[in-house]
Amino acid sequence: MRLVLILPFCAPRAFADVDRALDTHILPAHAELVIATQALADTAQTDCTPQAAPANSAIADFV
């Protein structure tokens, strides 16, 4: 019974940094992944050999 009374007060603290985590970590990393994915797709269109992909510096961090 006590847990049911305490839980509503704990929940806001558990999710307090979600917006900050999204803004500082998740969204910037996602943007970098989008750029790297596009670079990989562009490279694959011209040369789809394994040696061609690491030559692109945008992809090297994710390979």
Image (spheres, grey):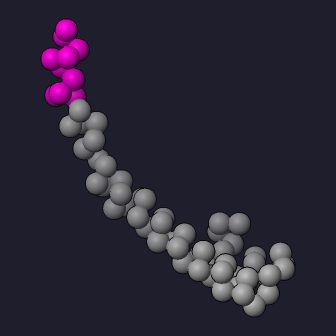
**Magenta residues, as a range?**
1-10
Residue 48 position by quadrant: bottom right
Residue 5 in the image: above or below residue 34? above
Residue sitting farthest toward the top: 1
Residue 50 part of the magenta-drawn span = no
Residue at 20%, 37% in the rendered image: 12
Q: Position of residue 59 (x, y in %)?
A: 66, 74
* Quadrant where the image shows the N terminus: top left
Residue at 59%, 80% in the rendered image: 38
Residue 22 in the image: above or below residue 38? above
Q: Position of residue 23 (x, y in %)?
A: 33, 62
Residue 60 position by quadrant: bottom right
Residue 47 in the image: above or below residue 62? below
Q: Residue 57: tell me if it is visible.
A: no
Residue at 75%, 91% in the rendered image: 46
Q: Position of residue 2 (x, y in %)?
A: 19, 10
Residue 24 in the image: above or below residue 32? above
Residue sitting farthest toward the front: 45
Give the side of residue 16 with respect to residue 40, left or right: left
Q: Residue 54: tell me if it is visible.
A: yes
Q: Main secondary structure of the magenta part?
A: helix
Give the side of residue 20 with respect to residue 35, left or right: left
Q: Position of residue 16 (x, y in %)?
A: 25, 44
Residue 2 part of the magenta-drawn span = yes
* Quadrant where the image shows the C terminus: bottom right
